[in-house]
Amino acid sequence: MPTYNKLVRDLIPNIIEQSGKGYKIEVLSEKEYINELQKKLQEEVDEYREAIEGQDAIEELADILELMKALAEKHGSSIDEVEKVRKEKAEKRGAFNNKVFLVEVED
């Protein structure tokens, strides 16, 4: 039996069971859960960076957004609040639309 030792989406055990396979799961503590969310976020960012086609990139961005939603909730907030903060920062400091790459600043 392959060993995965990673956080998976909630319905994955059902999908495995429907395929006729057995599985073993554990329910994480809050501290373990946040740690695994962070690890999964890094995994999905790496997968996004490797995505070649547009739809693959969109799939990975959707996974990242799902993880951001879960992490926001674990920090006592919501994805709507994250979006509000994003908008405020964009208004005050700009976004990343103009491809500005800062090389250096004089002392």
Image: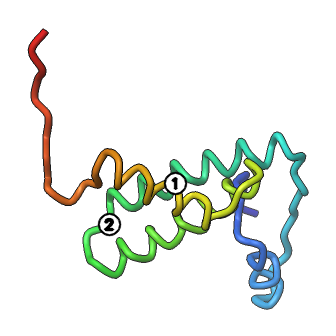
Residue 87 drawn at (x, y percent): 43, 60
Q: Residues within 10 Å of mark 1 (few under 14, many from 20)?
A: few
Residue 39 drawn at (x, y percent): 61, 46
Q: What residue type is labelled 2?
A: Ala
Q: Which mark is residue 7?
A: none
- Looking at the image, which residue is at 77% across and 52% down? 76
- Secondary structure type for disc 2: loop
Above or below 88: residue 10: below
Place residue 45 in its image quadrant.
bottom left
Q: Distance between the residues labelled 2 and 1?
A: 28 Å
Q: Relative to 5, is 39 on the left or the right?
A: left
Q: Relative to 92, is 87 on the left or the right?
A: right
Q: Name the residue under label 2.
A: 51
Q: Residue furthest top?
A: 107
Answer with mark 2 or mark 1, whichever residue precedes in sequence: 2
Q: Which amino acid does label 1 sit on?
A: Val
- Residue 50 visible, this orientation: yes
- Secondary structure type for disc 1: helix
Place residue 20 in its image quadrant.
bottom right
Residue situated in front as seen by the camera: 54 or 74: 74
Residue situated in front as seen by the camera: 78 or 8: 78
Q: Which residue lies furthest to the bottom in this view?
A: 18
Q: How crowded is mark 2: few (under 14 residues within 10 Å), some or many (20 or more)?
A: some
- Looking at the image, which residue is at 14% across and 56% down? 98
Q: Mark 1 points at which residue?
A: 85
- Looking at the image, which residue is at 56% across and 53% down? 41
Query: Which quadrant is the N terminus positioned in?
Result: bottom right
Above or below 100: residue 65: below
User: Which colour scheme appears in the figure?
Assistant: rainbow
Residue 47 drawn at (x, y percent): 42, 59
Residue situated in front as seen by the camera: 97 or 10: 97
Query: Which quadrant is the C terminus positioned in?
Result: top left
